[in-house]
């Protein structure tokens, strides 16, 4: 996609945790995504977010299969590492992914795996602890 930006990568990561984990995106996850983008990218307007979300969903659909989508998830995480360079900012990305994962009050094993991949890709393995129950997932900083 010609207009793909690193902001798209953030939205893509959020969409992946919402959809790839359990095959659906419920309203609580949609609201969590929108709210978390506003926190991470405060200068993005509602119209810009809506446009980005539509482009991300188009790309997600165009990728066609789970392997391609997961590959793009990894690519997007690497791109985010260049945008969010401080431990605090990377912690916020992981924390927001966990927030989206728990938005429907159930932590699917795929959601957990995707958050763990984000922790690894963002070089946060020694800097956060993931605390999981069936219905919650919290990220505790250790830095």
Image: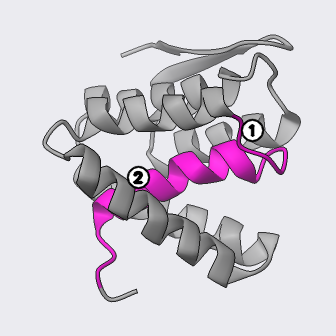
Measured as percent of width and height from the top left, residue 76 is found at 46, 63
Q: Provide the residue designation for mark 2.
A: 10
Q: Residue at x 35, y 63 (%)?
A: 51
Q: Is residue 125 visible?
A: no
Identify the image quadrant of residue 62.
Answer: bottom right
Name the foreground residue: 22 vs 110: 22
| Left or right of 141, for residue 110 | right
Q: Residue at x 86, y 35 (%)?
A: 109
- Highlighted range, magenta: 3-26
- Toward the front, the furthest residue is 47
Q: Is residue 21 above or below residue 137?
A: below
Q: How many marks?
A: 2
| Left or right of 58, for residue 43 | left
Q: Is residue 114 above or below residue 12?
A: above
| Left or right of 112, for residue 45 | left
- Determine whether label 2 and label 1 are within 8 Å by CB: no
Label 2 vs label 1: CA separation?
16 Å
Q: Residue at x 37, y 28 (%)?
A: 92
Q: Provide the residue designation for mark 1.
A: 111
Q: Residue at x 80, y 12 (%)?
A: 135
Precedes in sequence: disc 2 or disc 1: 2
């Amino acid at each position: 996609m010609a207009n793909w930006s690193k902001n798209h990568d953030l939205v893509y990561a959020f969409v992946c945790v919402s959809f790839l984990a359990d095959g659906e995106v419920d309203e609580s996850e949609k609201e969590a995504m929108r709210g978390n983008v506003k926190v991470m990218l405060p200068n993005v307007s509602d119209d810009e977010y809506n446009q980005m979300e539509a482009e991300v969903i188009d790309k997600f659909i165009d990728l066609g299969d789970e392997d391609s989508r997961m590959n793009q998830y990894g690519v997007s995480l690497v791109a985010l590492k260049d945008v969010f360079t401080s431990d605090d900012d990377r912690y916020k990305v992981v924390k927001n992914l966990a927030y989206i994962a728990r938005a429907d009050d159930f932590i699917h094993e795929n959601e957990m795996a995707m958050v763990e991949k984000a922790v690894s890709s963002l070089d946060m393995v020694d800097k956060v602890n993931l605390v999981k129950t069936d219905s919650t997932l919290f990220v505790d900083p250790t830095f």
